[in-house]
Image (spheres, helix red, strand yellow):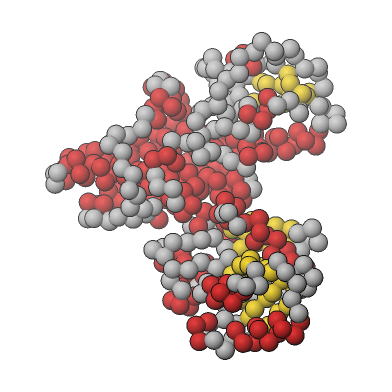
Amino acid sequence: MSSKSPSNDFNFFKLYFNSDNLLKQSVIKQALNSPDFMPTLEKMAKAASGIVDAIWNNDNSEIPAELFNTYNDNFHKGIGDASNLLKNNVSRLAAAKTNYTVQQLHNAKTAAKGNKDEYNRQAKLILARANSTQAAEYNTAVHRARVAKQWEQFQGERHLYPNIQWLRTRSATPREIHLAYVGRIWPMDDPFWNSNSPGCTWNCKCSWKTTDQKPTDNSSLSVVEASAGLEGNPYYTHEIFTNKHPYFSRVDKHVPNLGPLHNPDDIAFIQKITKDGHKYLEHFNCKDEKEIAENRKVVELLLKEGVVKEAALLPRIHQREVELRERYYGKEYNSLRPAKCPDCKADGEFLEFKETTLKNLSANILKASKQGDIAVIKLDSHIDNDWITRFCKKQFTLKDRKGLKKIIISTSEKTYLYRK
């Protein structure tokens, strides 16, 4: 369970609906008119009922699967065939929202002081808020995913239509917030579009189109600040929701990363292509790891040298997440190394990457052996062929590295492979 536990619910009514009940009802109605939203709402109600009872009975799950899945599936249906980058991004929000909602339910239980009727009353209000915010989040996700696709289309049209015109909202009751933009034209490469696009404020229904008309004079125009969580052009940022969304500051740092970990492999892993045309996979969560740039270089080298044929860079998963660890690493690995995380899985075996000097070579092979079946070592110095062969064969005989199956040594001159 997250250690962060706010005493009061964040004012989403103000952020999403500008404290306007009519706007709120309009947003909910729009979501309910979507063929994908109503079935999810019914699933949410069923899942929420189970979560309320589970928390009363001392369940401390950070993101209960049944509740997370309803939010996550709803977002994925909303953004349709968007890229895996966008799908994993909304999964981060789904995980944070689930945990935040669970926190509120735990707070309600504490405040009820053993009175289950009072707890159920508060829980009903909490879940009603969660459903209304889901409507706003869903509508905005749908719109921003459309915006990302439109921008991609615009790139192919720019030789004919080099500029973009902001169009009036489709809403029958438009808000004033973007009306000053309507009819204005900017060059497609204007910095304005890096931080402004339809959907950059909650429940915005504005649109845009390419045009060959000349840009308007926008020098005196006051730029509208993006809403918290909707900063940037989603085509460039690969984000429907940014880390500035209020959910993220109200849950523990690791919680959003649980979202992509629960996605199926065909969504969670992003395909990468090396300069030499070799393909490999990288889990979405790897992108923010400090060592990712070096790890990518190692995988590229191994594929180029033909040392491995298939490779996937793996996410780091805390030892308490046993089911996730067994899914990504396998039961055998998790049994032998319950607190370790390998860098990569290649051709069915787990690899750990290290970069070291000749002096610390043996120590780093030992460290790698504790995290993978294969130690992949990048050396910064020249080595003698005969010496490194004797050295690596000796490593396999040492008792403290019994799980070691292979050693791969990479220098600027050559790549060496040794088997047990």
Q: In the picture, which quadrant includes the C terminus?
A: bottom right
Q: In front: 74, or 155?
A: 155
Residue pictured at 36% horizontal, 32% vertical: 10
Does the image show residue 74?
A: no
Residue pictured at 57% horizontal, 63% vertical: 314
Q: In front: 229, or 378?
A: 378
Residue pictured at 74% horizontal, 12% vertical: 217
Asked which quadrant contains residue 167, the reply is top right
Does the image show residue 27?
A: yes
Asked which quadrant contains residue 172, the reply is top right
Q: Looking at the image, is 189 positioned above or below residue 156?
A: above
Q: Is residue 214 left or right of residue 236?
A: right
Asked which quadrant contains residue 339, the reply is bottom left
Residue pictured at 41% horizontal, 43% vertical: 97
Residue 39's spot in the image, x, y percent? 45, 45
Q: Looking at the image, is 338 positioned above or below residue 110?
A: below
